[in-house]
Image (cartoon, rainbow, N blue to C red):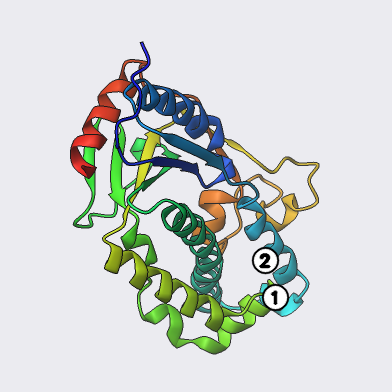
Amino acid sequence: MLIQPQHKPKINLIAPHQNEHPTAVPFLKAFRKHLQEQGHETASWKISNTHKLGWTLRQRISEFPPFFKYDADEITRLSDFATFALAVQDVLKRARHADSCLQSNPGSMVIEVHSWLPDNKAGSGGPYEKDLKNGFILDNFRHVLNFPQTVWRDETLLGCLARLMSFDINDAREQIRAISKRFREQNAKIFCLEVPAQRTVRLIKNSNPLYPLYYKPDGTIYYGISEFEQLYSIKAFCGAAYENGEVARIASSIMDIVK
């Protein structure tokens, strides 16, 4: 029996990374259905093409042959800043979406639904992380907005990578800071839920023109591919590593935490 909403906060569910959709979206749909049965007003979104951020940058980096002549330290440094440049765009897009949800419906909450392989994740170890058991983790979105100051110090390299992707790093930084400040002032309820996947598969096949930019002839990944690209651009998370009954348990656990 469907319980009618009774002044409960609207819950916005967002799947922000397309390569995680095969695992995240089925859970999101089941999660949303359960919340609606409990009387919650809900809305849901799928964000597409995050993986293409990495593809775009990798393609443009490859157009500068000196990149392949750098020594190991320089490649590592470039890889680190590539991750920052890509993460800034990803986080800004997610923050804008969450902000839009909260501004249009004050008092509501946002839960991002992600997927991961439990045996591959170290966890942020941050003060907000909650182990919900059986491979599920809940974290506060605010830590995602807290880029270390070292991200912004080498503005020459970071700005160069940003220009390769046609965005203004300084404008992005100010937008993230402004949204983060608004979230703090509003004590915004924005969370990231990690759903366990069974396996990963390659997003880029041999026939893809991008394949030789990521993979050596023996099929191994080139040294220097950024962490962001390894997480979101070259693999997809598939399969559900949980039982159907977990949806109700996780929903109950989350609502106890965020209320």
Residue at left 76%, top 41%?
Answer: 206
Pick whichever, 205 or 161, lies toward us: 161
Q: How many marks?
A: 2
Image spot of residue 194 (x, y percent): 37, 40
| Quadrant location of the N terminus in the rendered image | top left
For the residue pair 1 and 249, the one nearer the viewer reads as 1
- Are the two marked residues, 1 and 2, in contact with CB atoms closer than 8 angstroms? yes
| Front one among 145 and 41 | 41
**Label 1 crowd (10 A; few <14 / some 14-19 / many >=20):** some
Counting from the top left corner in percent of width and height, residue 141 is at 35, 55
Q: Is residue 77 left or right of residue 127?
A: right
User: Eyeballing the image, is 244 above or below 92?
Assistant: above
Name the residue carrying label 1: 164
On screen, residue 162 versus residue 252, left or right, reads: right
Q: Which mark is residue 97?
A: none
Asked whether residue 132 is in view, the answer is no
- From the top left corner, tell me how far across and down residue 227 is, in percent: 49, 59
Residue behind mark 2: 57
**Residue type, mark 2 in image:** Leu
Question: From the image, which quarter does the C terminus lie in?
Answer: top left
Q: Give the residue displayed 51% in from the left and 50% down from the top.
A: 231
Residue 68, percent from left and from top? 68, 72
- The residue sitting at the top extreme is 1
Q: Earlier in the sequence, mark 1 or mark 2?
A: 2
Q: Amino acid at mark 1?
A: Leu
Q: Quadrant of residue 198?
A: top left
